[in-house]
Amino acid sequence: MSIIAGATTQPEGTGLLTVGGPAQSGQAVGRIWRSIRQNNKAFVGFILLGIFTLMAIFPWAIARDDPSAEIYARSAGPSSAHLLGTTYYGQDIFSQAVWGTRETLIIAVVSGALSTVLSVIMGLAAGYLGGAADAVLNYVTDVLLVIPTFPLLLIIVAYLPHAGVPVLIAVLVVTGYSYGARQLRAQTLSVRSKDFLEAARVRGERSFYIIVVEIIPSMTSLIVATFLGTAVYNVLASAGLQFLGIGNPSSISWGTMLYWAQNNEALQTNQYLWALVPGALIGILGAAFALVNYAFDEISNPALARVPLGRARFGQARYSLRRLHANRAS
Amino acid sequence: MRYALRRVGFFVLTLWTCVTLNFLLPRMMPGNPAIAMLARFHGRLNPASLKAIEIAFGVNTHQSLWSQYVSYLHDLLTLNFGTSITFFPASVSSVIKSAIPYTLGLVGITTILAFLLGTLIGIVGAWKRGGVLDSLLPPLFVITSAIPYFWVGMLMILVFGLKLQWFPYTFSYDPTLTPSFSWPFISSVIDHAILPAVAILITSVGAWILTMRNTMITTLAEDYVKMARAKGLPGRRIMIDYAARNAILPNLSGFAMSVGFIVSGAVLVEYVFNYNGVGYLLVQALNAEDYPLMQALFLLITIAVLIAILLADIVTAMLDPRTRAAR
């Protein structure tokens, strides 16, 4: 518990402020791994993510039943043949839960990664180039930041009936990158005038080289935090969308399980597990990402954080709050 | 003053972007979804409203995109959002008007409660550093923040609605009653709001706790707090007047912003409880492909959020001079 108490003195929940030269980034991987083993939260989070990854890659090793086959007794309770019972359509719930990991995890990881890449491009370009480029990029990001994300997601998807997973991911990326981009831009502004960048400029390096080789490595932990934060949000948002029947309802994922459970009034008809299991799994997956993220905050903050001006801190706190509350809609 | 003008400028630009996005989205999408929608409604709607929808979505009109845009803007300014398809022949504005009070009541009151409760717990948690409240809540919040909110709603329905049967769990009032300002109706509304309210409260209070606690911890390390301690002021006075008063700013501006989110409702929670507010209306519009209703709702939600953010910025600038200089 002492780790928590000592480390979370930062005003922002997710904001990482790592100001440091490239020299520090070389040791980052080793330091991160050592910290993971020492930090209970990070350890639990990583174990959970590992289990889910195995479930996503080798679902047949855990659940032998075909998740979509409608061949068993309908609406049966838990038994040795069907650990979590069956659905109204006679599908095995345990098998659906295991096989559903794949699509859920793919959406979370791929959309999280792509939107982090977009955040890095938009944030660093805006922060480093400055001037007109900054004005335009920052305006686009700001607009996307203030539009309520979940209603926007719903509206866009509504115009794309029968949208599959790729469309879902694309929409999540476009609507979800802005928060990370804003943080990375602020961070870029604060390192822009550091000596190690000045030195690179004096050496005559091009902007592209400076951004990729000098700036990005110095922001590793912020970029990782952006990825983890976006992944948590995307797990929830995609589950919410699929719960409403958006996307392909015949695919096997936790969100579509919830959709069918809700459509068949699973709660009202004593088929609790059908509705409770996928929701709990979404919660556990989200919590796994969140735990790693939270632990990451603790690990990288006290060692590296050189807190900038009061107003910068304040601004960051506001936007992480905005992010936290945006989640509520889903 | 320059700061306020810049914020207003951003507000106007963003508003324009949203309005234009709303106009362009259905026209940009592959195979114009409005045409498919119109095909389905042919013969079910009267020719006049069909015509109105065609004009609204730029189908079968020989107007240029620009003149469509101009008439779209004109309709917006005169608050003419057309006819809803789901609730035909009601106008979109009247459908939205009937949903707004329920959302404002449910989400509005829970937002205020969550803010007050979270801020208070955050203050006390940070003050009693390392106490039960402080060591238990942050990790707990990490976990609750990852639970889908609608799923918490489903749990509430299962436990308190179906098993214990303490509260009703569907719709916003007893449908056998007619809406009026009478006690039976009002008490029925309150009864129906309790479960969704608790579901929202459980999942949203953590954000307030965490922000308040973290800012408070930073503030407690400031010199003027040490000074107050050195002067021997009573603990409660330091906690409230010295630390909390300064640390509450991020939470206050967060509150101002979340006021904007009240209007959008809690989409999925309202859906789970069949609570007939704005969020549920949006889902209904989505399922029925009721584009006029959807567009109007999206605009309403966005404008509410934009106004709240503008107000939040201005209030913060008034309360905290440091922000005025910040970009």
Image (tube, helix red, strand yellow):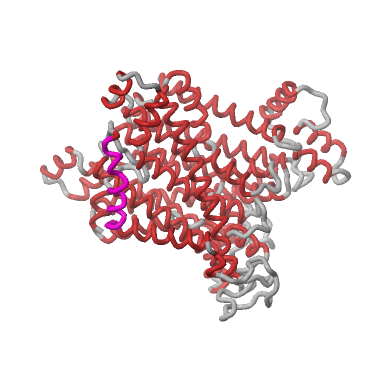
Please say if B18 is above or below A87.
above
Q: Is residue A63 visible?
A: yes
Is any atom of residue B185 visible in this view? no
The residue positioned 62% from the left and 30% from the top of the image is B19
Is residue A26 on the magenta stretch? yes
Residue A155 position in % (x across, y down):
64, 42
Residue B283 locus on image (x, y percent): 65, 50
Residue A22 x, y percent position in the rendering: 29, 34
State the predominant SS element of the stretch in magenta. helix
Query: In the rendered view, does A238 fall on the left or right side of B92?
Result: left
**Observer-nearest of B196 and A181:** A181
Observer-nearest of B310 and A289: A289
Residue B44 picture location, percent across and down: 86, 46
Quadrant in which the N terminus of chain A appears: bottom left
Judging depth in this view, the residue of A152 and B274 nearest the camera is A152
The part of the image, by quadrant, that contains residue A130 is top left
Q: Which residues are magenta?
A: A23-39
Residue at image position (75%, 32%) is B56
Residue sitting at the far bottom: A80
Q: Is residue A322 left or right of residue B136?
A: right
Residue visible at 70% across and 36% down? Answer: B29
